[in-house]
Image: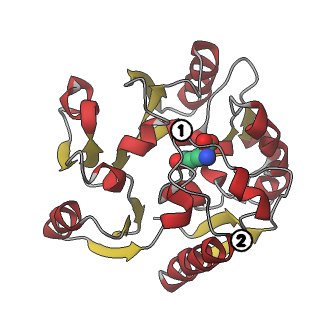
């Protein structure tokens, strides 16, 4: 169960957000509206939401999921791989200190990794081997989680994948929402795979909130599959974030504070 989320207001500079292909420039006003709806949806689900101010120097900074990984025992500040994003990590530390004692906050310093590449399934963390992390960063992350009794492993990724979380999210109860090449990876055979077709691949990133799954609208087949498993599904229009490779989970850190 989560009780809190942290989000960050998109900055006007988001029009310069990193993207792998150009499918249009985000409309800032529309992005603000979509972000507001995301926050309101979280509030309607009973969560306490802390919305941090926009950071104009960081076009991608609304994607707070990438700068930290938060659990019921501790928090890890990651180390984003791109020059454009690396400094974002400094701007989450003070906020996390409100929710975690300082000795429960760890920092990835030995290499790179980003939260979007890290998928937790129960007490195991899968780390994507994308260009947004390297071996040293992944190894340090795993060494932190192991100190708390969790386990971790790395997953080879298709070359064009941004993050592991772009192609896969865990929606609890052993259900893995998944698409693309990952479907055939035996590492996930122990899960019930809820497969999004190639055409609906964007919807493989769904955001589980206490039994409800937030999904991008416009992907009817996979949305129905999730509903058929008994979940409430809330669909949101995420179009402006999609233009800069953002999906449903990346707009928040979801957790229960320990302080
Ligand atoms: C980036 O390329 O880093 C951003 N434009 C998108 C990050 C999306 N993050 C996520 O899915 N966790």
Q: Identify which residue, 42 or 217, lies in the foreground.
A: 217
Q: Position of residue 105 (x, y in %)?
A: 74, 41
The spot of residue 84 in percent (x, y) is 77, 38
> Residue 213: which disc?
none
Query: Which element is circle 2 on?
Result: strand
The residue labelled by disc 2 is 50
As helix, strand or loop, the secondary structure at mark 1 comes to loop
* Residue at image point 50% right, 32% down: 149
Tell me the tag on residue 20: 1
Q: Position of residue 246 (x, y in %)?
A: 53, 53
| Quadrant in which the N terminus appears | bottom left
Q: Who's the residue at 47% across and 29% down the image?
A: 127
Depth check, mark 2 against mark 1: the one in front is 1
Q: Quadrant of the C terminus?
A: bottom right
> Does residue 156 appear left or right of residue 255 in this picture?
left
- Asked if 155 appears above or below 162 in the picture, the reply is above
Residue 171 in view, yes or no:
no
| Residue 226 percent location from the top left of the image | 21, 63
First in sequence, mark 2 or 1: give its number.
1
Under 8 Å from ligand 1: the CB of mark 1? yes
Residue at (49%, 36%) from the top-left corner? 162
């Amino acid at each position: 169960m989560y009780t809190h989320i942290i989000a960050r207001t998109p900055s006007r500079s988001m029009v310069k957000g990193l993207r792998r292909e150009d499918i249009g420039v985000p409309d800032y006003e529309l992005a603000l509206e979509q972000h507001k709806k995301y926050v309101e949806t979280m509030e309607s689900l009973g969560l306490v939401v802390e919305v941090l101010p926009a950071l104009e120097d960081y076009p991608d900074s609304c994607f707070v999921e990438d700068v930290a990984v938060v659990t019921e025992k501790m928090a890890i500040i990651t180390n984003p791989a791109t020059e454009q994003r690396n400094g974002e990590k400094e701007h989450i530390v003070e906020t996390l200190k409100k929710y975690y004692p300082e000795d429960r906050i760890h920092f990835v310093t030995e290499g790179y990794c980003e939260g979007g590449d890290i998928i937790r399934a129960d007490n195991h963390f899968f780390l994507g081997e994308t260009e947004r992390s390297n071996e040293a960063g992944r190894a340090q992350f795993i060494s932190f989680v192991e100190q708390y009794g969790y386990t971790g492993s790395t997953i080879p990724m298709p070359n064009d994948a941004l993050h592991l979380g772009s192609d896969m999210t865990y929606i609890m109860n052993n259900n893995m929402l998944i698409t693309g090449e990952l479907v055939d990876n035996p590492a996930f055979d122990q899960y019930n795979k809820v497969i999004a077709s190639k055409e609906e691949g964007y919807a493989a990133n769904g955001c589980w909130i206490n039994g409800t799954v937030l999904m991008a609208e416009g992907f009817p087949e996979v949305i129905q599959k999730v509903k058929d498993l008994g979940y409430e599904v809330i669909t949101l229009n995420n179009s402006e974030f999609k233009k800069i490779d953002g999906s449903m989970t990346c707009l928040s850190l979801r957790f229960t504070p320990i302080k």
